[in-house]
Every structure is written in C-alpha cells, then in structure tokens.
Image (cartoon, grey):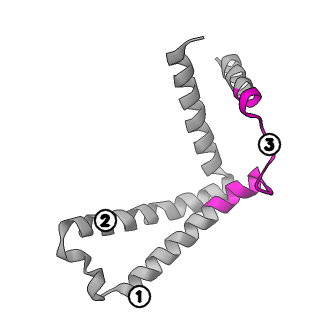
Amino acid sequence: MEERLVNIQEKYNDKLGYTQKICCFRVKTLTQLIPILLLLDSVFFFTQTFFRWGAPCFLWWNSIPTTITFFIGHITRLTGIPVCIYSNIYLLFASIISLLLLSFLVVVNINLGP
C-alpha cells in the first residue's frame, strides 16, 4: 500500500511540479504563519464582541438566526485557539491538511482505477 501511495505522489509531483517556496516564503514558514493569522483573527473577533456589546446593531439575542451565528462564531474560534497553538508548535495543521489531501487522492485513484 505504501508503494502505491508513493507512486501517486510521484505522479502528481510530475504533473503539477513541486517547489520549496510559495510567494517568496518557504513552505515551513507559511505553515507556521497560517495558525498565527488564525490566532490574530480570533483575538480580534473577541475584541470586537467586547466593544460592540450593547450596541443596537449587535443585539444577537433578538432573533434565532443571529443567536445561532453568534454562538457558532464564538465556539469555532474558541476551539480554534488551542488547535492553532498546537499546530504551530508541532505543525499539526500541515499534517492534517496533507493527510486529507492524500486520502482524497487515494479515494479518487481507487474510484477511477488504474
């Protein structure tokens, strides 16, 4: 099975190419930059919640759709903060994305056949 996965990776590298840099950044640098940007987004999101609290345009409890949006936004960011910290330390984010892409390629290859 491992040999088959290596062959799939080599085929896609041959077709699409492989580079160590993306837009003047190394791939490792970008995988560390993405969680940092997500952390900043979460901090700014909670900051805007604090400053907008009580404003007439921020009455999220008046209707069910805005309440659902409010809670989903906050829960997503609360769960994202530890994931971002963990992924920045161990590059878990890049590993998960690679695993998802690899599993997608394996499923596509199995469905299309040789």
Nearest to viewer (mark 1 / mark 3): 3
The part of the chain drawn in magenta is 12-34
Residue assigned mark 3:
19
Q: Secondary structure beneath disc 1?
A: helix
Please check the rendered image and state whether residue 20 is part of the magenta-colored stretch, yes or no. yes
- Identify the residue shown where x is 19% and y is 66%: 64
Q: In this view, does 63 lie to the left or right of 25?
A: left
Residue 15: mark: none
Earlier in the chain: of badge 1 and badge 3, it is: 3
- Identify the residue shown where x is 67% and y is 52%: 91
Please check the rendered image and state whether residue 108 is part of the magenta-colored stretch, yes or no. no
Residue 67 picture location, percent across and down: 25, 69
> Up-down: is 7 above or below 20?
above
Kindly identify the amino acid type of the residue bearing the numbered disc 1: Phe
Residue assigned mark 2:
69
Earlier in the chain: of badge 3 and badge 2, it is: 3
Residue 48 picture location, percent across and down: 44, 81
Q: Do the residues labelled 3 and 2 touch (CB within 8 Å)?
A: no
Residue assigned mark 1:
51
Distance Cα–Cα, label 1 vs label 3? 43 Å
Task: Answer few, some or many: residues within 10 Å of disc 1's Cα (few below 14, many 20 plus, some between 14 and 19).
Answer: few
Kindly identify the amino acid type of the residue bearing the numbered disc 2: Thr
Kindly identify the amino acid type of the residue bearing the numbered disc 3: Thr
Task: Answer few, some or many: residues within 10 Å of disc 2's Cα (few below 14, many 20 plus, some between 14 and 19).
Answer: few
Nearest to viewer (mark 3 / mark 2): 3
Q: Which quadrant: the C terminus?
A: top right
